[in-house]
Image (spheres, rainbow, N blue to C red):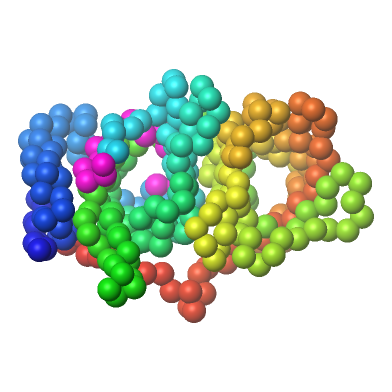
Amino acid sequence: MYLDVILVTKSYVLLPKLNIMKSRNNYFIAILALITIQMGCTPAERPAAVELEKNALIGSWRLIKTIEIGHEDSTNRRDGDEKFYIKHVNNTHFVWVEYDRINNTLLGTGGGTYTLEGNTYTEYIQFYYPAGANELGQAIPFRAELSKDGIWHHTGYAKLMEFDPETAENVMVDSAIIDELWKRIDIKPADDSNGQLVGSWDFVNFLEQSDSTYSEYPPFYGIMKILTPTHFTWVQYNTEGDEIFGIGGGPYSIVGDQYTEHIEFIYPQDLDLIGVNAVYNWKQDHDNHWNISGVVENRKAPQKREENWERYKAVLESEAEPEPESMN
């Protein structure tokens, strides 16, 4: 049996379908928790909203508080000393990373394109780790607010899907409420005052060590680099399946024609690369082409490398994104 449940928060209403037969406890927990959120938040936790401008969320953010209702493994996740939980947003893409600092282990990541229309922030999930997640392929709408002191608060819900053998399709069986507070990472932006590199870049080819010809990857092997004013993240994923081949990132700096990446995390794990710098010379033949060549300071042996990137093109009409469910 399904029941449309109206979940009322401070500023808006969510209308997820909950499977009461399967998730009766989650239903009552969700209602109680949302009442608590609505009535119990202090002004610091639920800051007064200001109108969001088009580029208001561009930057790198650390998670300071979250409440997830509906996931069986729900926890109060946040950035801290033992792990970092960060989200990077540029003008077209977002990526979030949860990483165990102590054991240098990737706990989770996801990303894709996004839209921001008024106070509706919608994430279109194109890659996700670990594999088999419900979120992959979803359009997840959030009600976004940005306080005058820079706290980003968004609330939305993700569908929980299961395979239905009768219809041979994935069907929604439940939903998970996501309520998060983010704080902008307070570090000096890279010296890129014109924003030449901020954005998303598609990988073209590379030249490594003493190779004489450039190497490419097969078409299904998607490689993207996402740059905010302070951080970079590269991700390699299967564009035709549910698999992330690799991801890494950290802060970067620009001094003249020298572009330096400080590798803060990497997956699959490579302890010889964590904490080292990749120092490149960079140039742009034109606005949409970016070339870097230099040395990755691998602890075993420095690695010479050259890479070519093309600025991300808008999603083709033939690759239309799924429509999110209304937040109103």
> With 50 as the anchor, is 230 left or right in this view?
right
Q: Which residues are magenta?
A: 57-72
- Quarter the N terminus occupies: bottom left
Residue 52: x, y in percent?
31, 51
- Quarter the C terminus occupies: bottom left
Residue 47: x, y in percent?
21, 36
- Foreground of the two, 327 or 78: 78
Residue pictured at 50% horizontal, 58% vertical:
242
- Foreground of the two, 171 or 203: 171
From this viewpoint, is residue 198 visible? Answer: no
Residue pictured at 32% horizontal, 64% vertical:
163
- Foreground of the two, 278 or 42: 278
Residue 263: x, y in percent?
63, 33
Majority secondary structure of magenta residues: strand
Residue pictured at 69% horizontal, 64% vertical:
218
- Foreground of the two, 252 or 97: 97
Q: Is residue 114 magenta?
A: no
Residue 155: x, y in percent?
24, 47
Q: Is residue 64 magenta?
A: yes
> With 132 as the anchor, is 280 left or right in this view?
right
Tag count:
0
> With 150 as the anchor, is 288 left or right in this view?
right
- Give the quarter of the image for residue 193: top right
Residue pictured at 32% horizontal, 57% vertical:
140
From this viewpoint, is residue 64 visible? Answer: yes
